[in-house]
Amino acid sequence: MAIEEVIDRAVQLKDSIVIEYCTRSGKIFKCRISDIEYSNFYGGGYIFAYREDIDADRTFKISRILKVNGHAFRRIYWNQIGDDFKRIY
């Protein structure tokens, strides 16, 4: 199951989840979020949720979520593939 499917399920079931998140600056933190919905402002690649540890609403970029409820999701970025990828048909 992909991270997007896990997030989608949490949105539909109105579940709270614990995420490990990496900020743009590279800082990694863990927090519980609830009242999760897709961001109306930023679009489908983002979620808007209540962050319980700081008692505030926040927006999270889905591609920066590293873990959900302790489960890690592996992502492959183009810069990790290298030039050998061009040889795959």
Image (tube, helix red, strand yellow):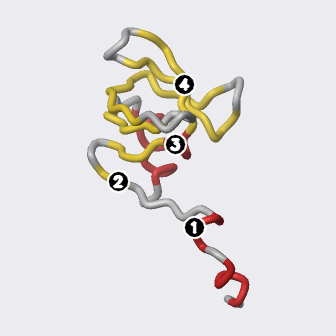
Work out whether mark 2 precedes mark 3 in sequence or the reverse, and give the earlier one: 3
Disc 2: CA contacts within 10 A as few (<14), some (14-19) or many (>=20): few
Task: List the residue tagged with mark 3.
Answer: 64
Residue 35 is tagged as none
Q: Secondary structure at mark 1?
A: helix
Residue for point 57% across, 67% down = 80
Tell me if mark 1 has few (under 14), some (14-19) or many (20+) residues whose alpha carbon lies within 10 angstroms of its own: few
Q: Amino acid at mark 4?
A: Phe
CA distance separating discs 1 and 3: 16 Å
**Toward which corner of the image does residue 59 lie, by quadrant?**
top right
Ranked by sequence position, the earlier of labels 3 and 4 is: 4
The amino acid type, in three-letter code, at marker 3 is Arg
Q: Are marks 2 and 3 in contact (CB under 8 Å)?
A: no
Is there CB contact under 8 Å for labels 2 and 4?
no
Left or right, residue 70 beside residue 64:
left
- Residue 75: give x, y in percent of width and height: 50, 60
Distance from label 3 to label 4 (Cα)?
14 Å
The answer to which of 86 and 68 lies nearer the viewer is 86
Q: Which residue is mark 1?
A: 80
Numbered badge on residue 72: 2
Name the residue: 44% across, 22% down. 35
> Going 29% across and 42% down the picture, which residue do you hit?
69
User: Which image quarter is the C terminus in?
Assistant: bottom right
Residue at image mark 4: 48
The answer to whether 88 is drawn above or below residue 65 in the figure is below
- Residue 72 position (above or below residue 9): below
